[in-house]
Amino acid sequence: MCIDARPGGFRSLGRSGRVPVVLCGVVLLVVLCSPTAGADERPLGLTTFLDRMMSVDHLPEPVAGHTRMTSTWDRTGRNGDGRDFKQIEGDRNVLLDVDGPGCVHRIFTGRLGKEVEGTRIRVYLDGGAKPVFDMPVNEFLDDKNGPFPYPLVFHKTYPGMLFPMPFAKHCRIELYNPAMNHWGNYWQVTYTQYAKNTPVETLTWPLSDAEKKTLERLCQTWLRAESAPPETPKQWTIRETITLAPKRWYQFTSHGGGVIRQLRVHASPSTPEVLSKVKLQCFWDGGKSPAVDMPIGYFFGNVATGYKDQYHSLLMGVDQEYAYCRFPMPFADGAVVRFENDSADKVTLKLQIDVERSEPDAVRPGRFRASLLETEVEEAWANRDRLPRFGAKKQPVHTVLDVEKKRGKYVGVFLHVDWPSKPWWGEGDWLIWADEDGWPPAYHGTGSEEYFNSGWCKFDQKAVSGIIREPVMRPGHVGVYSFHLNDAFSFENRLRVAVEICTWLGSGSKMPHSFWRSTAYWYEFPAAQ
């Protein structure tokens, strides 16, 4: 083994083998105060939610509450999601009626224009007789002249908005149309209900000057995140170029407490073979089992596209120079980041790692994890009885994440689908159970695309969702991502995330080798005392 110890880190190159229990080297870094320390001690108001949509520091913190969705999902199991409204009361169509404390994070629909002509949307908070918002749907979701600024409201593909609406006691969102029609289609409302003792400040309108400034800063942050990689630190903790022969590995360790703020990787050659065989492993706090253990191409989402096709977001991305990750990765008693070359090629890796040191007792409790799961469709169809199935039509699903007897928070996914259908890759609904069993789950979507804030076979890149394309793309071959900030899914004991696999292939389609692969990003917390 070759060891190179220096200020800033520990570097080792060697043959494949078990990670050493004792690691040498010292990391000398500046101790910084976390900008979100004590955030949970203050009431959750609009400014807090806006701040948490542009900072990722809060992600490793537990949240006492559950994220849910009301939607127009078709209870017969078919694809009539534009017609299954759950609570129509004469000339009012109730989309959401829940007690607080809570926050609405997202309102999403299928089409604007004539389909909602004459229909108004009304938002009542805390039982007030006068709605906070009462305006035509077409105006409410107007990204130029409506109440919310772009990019928090959009309708390049599906129309929707991501402006937070906190409430202390109650929230009711309804559509109003005296003709009792033109309800539109594909409605979704995503919200979180917090523990009863959680202090929440109810949204008031119009916004204060301070809230307007925070909102403007958020929009600027998102627009930059959609188009460019994150800012580089003043000094990287590790900045290395290494060459790994087959079956050789490299690792970096940091002792004590801290958090990995940013990780950048470039592999050459950047072929699918290499990106699917060079493995990333992360160990926290002296753990012997890796919290992250997967090929770098599936971790960053670029296994099929290398560094040619770029995508940028607030948390992950790829440009011509690097694939990058900004998920905070805390540790209190050491961290190991390891790369192993399981390919048949000699691989050159350019690595950049930014580690912020902190005292162990100041480290956030969540430990970052990433889980790779795959459904081979050809095998699944031959043994379809082995697949999990749910709903009226017992639709088979691809499991994205299934965690039992653990406490944590699901914060996002990268989904790679290779599907034989020429028209599309399916209309499977997303299903999420958090600390619950039975049917239906509290989060039930209306189709595959909507989970990624898109639709009608089109995708738009946003700070929290989007697509990475291959140079020549057919509709059934996609890589898509979606990340959760305020709307992350907390769980105390059990979480299951799944997406229905469409059984319709289209005329003339056969069942060649096809797959659904997903990388789920989540945080694991210590068991509740």
Image (spheres, grey):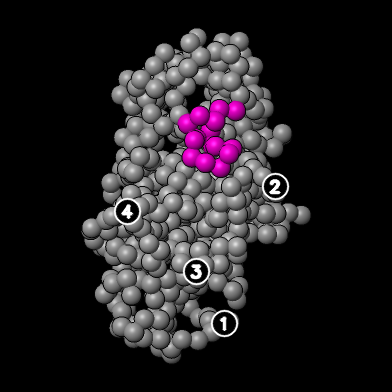
- The mark that comes first in sequence, 4 or 2, is 4
- Magenta span includes 78: yes
Q: Nearer the viewer, mark 1 or mark 3?
A: 3
Q: Are marks 4 and 2 in contact (CB under 8 Å)?
A: no
Which residue matches tag 2?
A: 438
Name the image quarter holding residue 401: bottom right
Does the rendering let one see residue 67? no
Q: Nearer the viewer, mark 4 or mark 2?
A: 4
**Residue, disc 4:** 422
Q: Position of residue 117 (x, y in %)?
A: 39, 16
Q: Indicate the secondary structure of the residue bearing disc 4.
A: loop
Prevailing secondary structure class for the magenta stretch in the rendered image: loop
* Residue 105 numbered tag: none
Earlier residue among tags 1 and 3 = 1
Towards the viewer: 140 or 362: 140
Q: Amino acid at mark 1?
A: Val
Q: Are marks 4 and 3 in contact (CB under 8 Å)?
A: no
Determine which residue is flagged by label 3: 379
Q: Residue at x 45, y 16 (%)?
A: 119
C-alpha span from label 4 to label 2: 35 Å
